[in-house]
Amino acid sequence: MDLTTLRAVLWDLRGRVLPSRFEKAQQPSPGTIQLGFRSLKGMVWLELSWQADSPRLTAIEAPPREGAGSTLAQQLQHSLRQLALVKLHQEGFERVVEFHFAPRPGEPIQRVLVLELMGRHSNLLLLDEQRRVIAPGRQVRDHQSRIRPISTGDDYCPPPPLQGHRPDKTERFERWQERLSLIPIPLKKALQQTYQGISPALATQLAGSWLTTPVDQLKAEQWETLHRRWCRWLEQMDLETFALQTNPNGSYRVWGENPAATQDSLALGLGKFYQERLGQRVLAKAQEELRHKIERWRSKEESELNDQQQRLKATENHAEIQQQADALLSLRQPNRDQINEAQKLYKRARKLRRSVAILNERIDHHQQRLALIHGSEGFIEEQLDAMWQDDLARKIGLQELQRELDDLLSPGEPPQSRRRQKQNQPQPLELTSPSGILVQVGRNHRQNDWISLRQARSGDLWFHAQECPGSHVVLKSSNAPADEDDLQLATDLAAYFSRARGNSIASVVMVPTDQLQRIAGAGPGTVRHGSGEIRWGHPQRIKERLFPPSLVEKTG
């Protein structure tokens, strides 16, 4: 978040939260705090983040309750209790915001919350009335910074002053051009090194396609165009005519040629923008971690499976070894050495014959684990394709998958962790069919097991894509008779929540849940069944029509 965006956010927030009563503080992640304020217009939530890669100040929708027990959140809750936010202060071109708190507007300031948005040096500090540090977002030790260490009890020292000239709209064009042209470097560097408050994003917005052009190669008309943009930016900063504009490439700007006023809060729009982008990044990270873990598991299982298959192949010559022993003892007068050799061959042949059953059992074990891994990959793909869910829900789904695989494929896990997981009841996706019948969709192995074997009742129907990894779908027809539309919905769901979702049509088997049998020794959700009815599902129909609220109602 650069200076221009910060100015725009403060302009928007002053009209929404000044004055307002502090009510709640919570810390959802180590580098982010969320503050709730009660104003005459209602509850307003602000998110203050000093994360090195995304420091920001935005407004957000009412967040879920998480992180209220952190030390920093409790210190803020205690220190700001019964106080009102009466001022938002930001000076010059510094990216430092001060939140001033007092019992009432016009009374002496008792607490100051300082948010410093300076990349990897960003921080949050709670100060008392003497501007001493009560609580820092992160402490800065002497060995981390010789210039400005920060600890509890220290007097607050502002960041070092900015380098460069302060932008001034009264500066003459010739003087402005002369300063930028002093050294023949690219225009982007010239803007950032010469003037304060010029971020890479703002430099791009000002310079456009001339960003990398050396200043000594710019033509007169280019200088004039650049100066007009420069003056427009400064004028909008002075007049505070800001509006949020998002671009298709994923960037945004808060000033421009014709800033259009929007009904929505600019700060709230930016909060949604950041939450969406950060959610996508967290989701991508969770996906990458899970994929790497699955690759390691698959490599290990394939290696062990190959080893057992090689051992099994080596047992195929046990009959030849037996014949060699028989031949030695069939001699007319075998000597002692020949008899001993025959006994060794008999022993080896018996050992090989006994090992066949054990090796086949081990091979089945590794094949089942590989099938479990293969099915998990389908669940991962489905979670990532579930654009009808928000990023947080998809991230939670991936994390649940990872915990499940850790439990199933890592036998060395502490038993108390296993007990804790067993206490958490699976939460499958639940939908309502056109006739009002509940339809359950398992989105991981445990959910499949839960709906198909533990919660199923006589009269329920089970659907699964034929010969394809995917979700179990259970139509709770034990509660009410199902018509053809209900059956087709469950069929389409089973096709969509499988690795056949990219097909235009997929075969789905329908079986009464009474006919399902758990496979002994196999992973959760692995079942066998008798003959069932083959139906045809249309995954794309689900993708296009199922999830709009007008067609289906979520019940879980």
Image: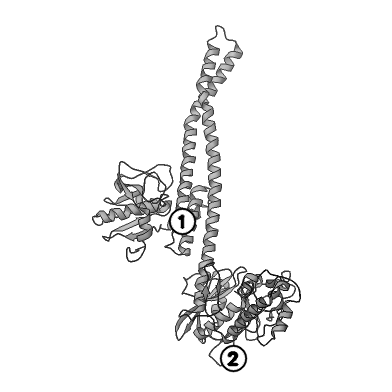
Q: Secondary structure at mark 1?
A: helix
Question: In front: 422, or 96?
Answer: 96
Q: What is the spatial separation of the Cα atoms under label 1 and label 2, in whole angstroms?
A: 52 Å
Residue to which mark 2 is pinned: 108
- Give x and y (percent) for residue 347: 54, 22
Say which amino acid is labelled 1.
Gln
Nearer-the-camera pick, 141 or 334: 141
Q: Tell me what residue is drawn at x 59 percent, y 91 percent.
A: 108
Q: Please tell me which of labels 1 and 2 falls first in the chain.
A: 2
The N terminus sits in image quarter:
bottom right
Q: Is residue 182 left or right of residue 113?
A: right
The residue lying at 59 percent from left, 13 percent from top is 338
Q: Residue at x 55, y 6 (%)?
A: 332
> In this view of the protein, can residue 518 be seen by the observer?
yes
- Asked whether disc 1 touches disc 2, contact meaning CB atoms under 8 Å apart, the reply is no
Q: Is residue 540 above or below residue 16?
A: above
- Residue holding disc 1: 421
User: Where is the C terminus found, in terms of image quarters?
Assistant: bottom left
The type of residue carrying mark 2 is Pro
1 or 2: mark nearer the eye: 2
